Image (cartoon, rainbow, N blue to C red):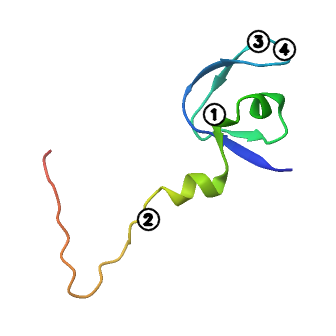
Amino acid sequence: MSVVFARSEGFTTHPVSGLRVHLRKDAPWPADDPLVRARPHLFATLAELTKDSPVESATQIPGERRTVRRGS
């Protein structure tokens, strides 16, 4: 079963039941759900979500200086 994830938080109407649906950011949904098919712009695949998020290195590279903000 293929899964997609809600892009943002909000409410929409389900196209089959007509009920109000609460979308929670990053919540999984079956890709074949009628809501996903009717409103694909509200959902993203895992690949789409991870390609835009930068990955931070957890270890310091030799010679690298990191800036730290304290008390902001």
Q: Residue at x 71, y 30 (%)?
A: 39
* x, y percent for residue 64: 22, 80
* x, y percent for residue 43: 65, 39
Question: Position of 53 compared to 19: left or right?
Answer: left
Q: Describe the element under mark 3 as helix, strand or loop.
A: loop
Q: Residue at x 18, y 76 (%)?
A: 65
Mark sitting on residue 70: none
Q: Describe the element under mark 4 as helix, strand or loop.
A: loop
Mark in front: 1 vs 4: 1
Residue 13: quarter of image:
top right
Q: Residue at x 30, y 83 (%)?
A: 61
Determine contact: label 4, label 3, CB under 8 Å: yes
Identify the residue position indicated by label 1 in the image: 42
* x, y percent for residue 47: 63, 58
Question: Position of 38 compared to 53: left or right?
Answer: right
Identify the residue position indicated by label 4 in the image: 17
Q: Residue at x 76, y 12 (%)?
A: 19
Q: Describe the element under mark 1 as helix, strand or loop.
A: helix
Mark 2 and mark 4: Cα distance apart in space: 40 Å
Identify the residue position indicated by label 2 in the image: 55
Determine contact: label 3, label 2, CB under 8 Å: no
Tell me the amino acid under the disc marked 4: Ser
Determine contact: label 1, label 2, CB under 8 Å: no
Q: Looking at the image, is 23 positioned above or below residue 11? A: below
